[in-house]
Image (cartoon, rainbow, N blue to C red):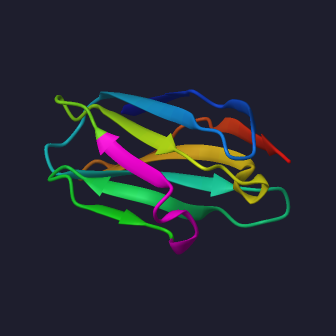
Amino acid sequence: QVQLVESGGGLVQAGGSLRLSCAASGSIFRLNVMGWYRQAPGKQRDLVAGITSGRITTYADAVKGRFTISRDNAENTVYLQMNSLKPEDTAVYYCNYQGGGGSYWGQGTQVTVSS
């Protein structure tokens, strides 16, 4: 019932920046949490950053000070500004939505950081 469309992934040099976007549509509950997770080959999917409908944020220790999560005015789109990228940030990044209607995932977008 909720669809998530991600964009903004790509190839970037170490030290560079990327901005990911996730547009949500469908039956979105007013109270919800959206976030970004990432999964590298052979690794589990881990939380990168999350943001509530009240714009309370949380970050993984590995990205604190480098990544910023935000929401648009309608709170239907979440962004992840990634600065000072490192090769270890290379992964497929997945958008997630959690609300009263359930939990949903985007299809993922590849981020590759070259050294």
Q: Position of residue 111 (x, y in %)?
A: 70, 39
Q: Quadrant of residue 12?
A: top right
Q: Position of residue 7 (x, y in %)?
A: 55, 26
Q: Nearer the viewer, residue 112 or 42?
A: 112
64 in the magenta segment: yes
Q: Residue at x 75, y 50 (%)?
A: 90
Q: Position of residue 47 (x, y in %)?
A: 52, 63
Q: Quadrant of residue 70?
A: top left
Q: Residue furthest bottom?
A: 61
Residue 46 vertical position relative to residue 115 in the rendered view, above or below:
below
Q: Residue at x 65, y 62 (%)?
A: 45
Q: Residue at x 58, y 69 (%)?
A: 62
Q: Residue at x 19, y 42 (%)?
A: 29
Report the magenta residues as a range: 61-70
Residue 33 vertical position relative to residue 16 in the rendered view, above or below:
below
Q: Position of residue 48 (x, y in %)?
A: 52, 59
